[in-house]
Amino acid sequence: MSKITAAITAVGGYLPDYVLTNQILETMVDTNDEWITTRTGIKERRLLKDSNKGTSYMAIKAAQDVLEKSGTDPKDIDMVIMATATPDMPVAATGVYVASQIGAVNAFSYDLVAACSSFLYGMSTAARYIESGRYKKVLLIGADKMSSIIDYEDRATCIIFGDGGGAVLFEPNEEGYGLQDEVLRSDGIGREHLKIDAGGSILPASHETVDAKKHYVFQDGKTVFKFAVSNMADGAAKILERNDLTGDDVAWLVPHQANKRIIDATARRMGLDDNKVMMNIERYGNTTSATLPLCLYDYEKQLKKGDKLIFASFGGGFTWGSIYLTWAYDS
Ligand code: COA
């Protein structure tokens, strides 16, 4: 019997309607379109404005899109992995609620929390379950309501992040398509540079923490940028080398969308032209766990069976890595 590989067989996505443009941000904080565009590549981002709706709302929409496009009966889903940095609430996993809402009544589910690398790590996790032969349909969702943890008076962070959700279905493949190799890393040195101080077990919520705005994201952008540029490019270069690939062999780089300059540096290191780089940061900003599946969602029509894709990510923690995957279908 041939080896089972874990292939992506369907892609879905969801973006909220509200568009927060650089021009609107100019009226909120001391910033300008030119600074944001040249430093980050971002022009606008989407926000889920309804305060009664959480990350699960976007995750459910993205998952339903996958089910509909692939004609999958939700009862056949074995597992739902919910990659997110902004769960609906602590303790009760968001993925469990999402699975129930989409009718995946025979699945088990949990959240996978690794900041901006949550989806990348989720790909690795989903692939192991499929490769085991025990699970046939694993739904991997990446969604984040970043607007729920961003201070819209802090220009260092509010210009960067957006809300959104994406999802993919992993299934066994016996032709060898799917996940081929991975380089995944983490380093606790990053803990102080990108974090939310309060609301966890070290500093539970109190009047003082709320008054001090400690429930919002803090980022030391310069330091994170430095680590992101070198590590994302290193991971991608390593995976090329290990698989005897050059930039010419690669059809697409699927990079985490945190900053266009980080993406450009990774592509240059891989010897890739711009037309092989998936990019939507201009329209969505950094949607954290949703960036990778939303790239696939936007570029799906251009993907062909056999295309070699290199995924690369970097995020808080620090967490980072790269995955080599061959595309399993003509879209
Ligand atoms: N508008 C205008 N000016 C701003 C600004 C804004 N939104 N934010 C910061 N500035 C100012 C700073 O105050 C600073 O001014 P000064 O030189 O007078 O002190 C200047 O612009 C440069 O700030 P700096 O923080 O050095 O900018 P940068 O080039 O590093 O860009 C980020 C800032 C956040 C865009 C960039 O550091 C970044 O993308 N970091 C990594 C993010 C990332 O990859 N995250 C990964 C995990 S998701």
Image (spheres, helix red, strand yellow):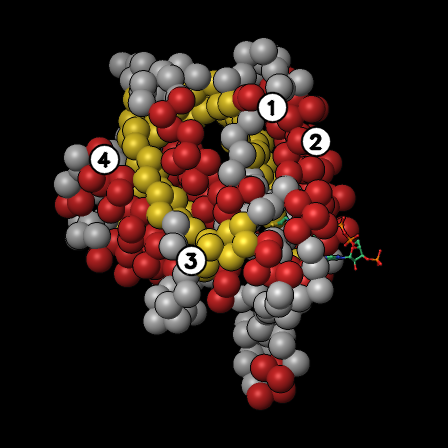
Q: Amino acid at mark 3?
A: Tyr
**Residue count near mark 1 (Cα–Cα under 10 Å), binned few <14, some 14–19, many ≥20:** some
Tell me whether circle 2 and circle 1 mark residues in contact (CB < 8 Å): no
| Disc marking residue 265 | 2
| Disc marking residue 69 | 4
- Residue hosting label 1: 274
Asked whether 2 or 35 is in front, the reply is 35
Q: Amino acid at mark 1?
A: Asp
| Residue beneath the point at 49% across and 66% down | 148
Q: Amino acid at mark 4?
A: Lys
- Residue hosting label 3: 18
Q: CA distance from mark 3 to mark 2?
A: 31 Å
- Which of discs 3 and 2 lies nearer the camera? The answer is 3
Residue 156: where, in percent of width, then height? 69, 60
Residue 42: where, in percent of width, then height? 60, 46
Q: Quadrant of residue 78?
A: top left
The N terminus sits in image quarter: top left
Outermost residue, bottom direction? 207
Looking at the rendered structure, the secondary structure element under dot 3 is strand
Q: Amino acid at mark 2?
A: Ala
The C terminus sits in image quarter: top left
- Which of discs 2 and 1 lies nearer the camera? The answer is 1
Which of the two discs, 3 and 4, labels the residue nearer the N terminus? Answer: 3
| Residue beneath the point at 39% across and 50% down | 15
Q: Describe residue 153's horizontal placement relative to residue 137 as left or right.
A: right
- Which of discs 1 and 3 lies nearer the camera? The answer is 3
Which of the two discs, 4 and 2, labels the residue nearer the N terminus? Answer: 4
Which of the two discs, 2 and 1, labels the residue nearer the N terminus? Answer: 2
- Relative height, residue 105 to residue 3 (above, below): below
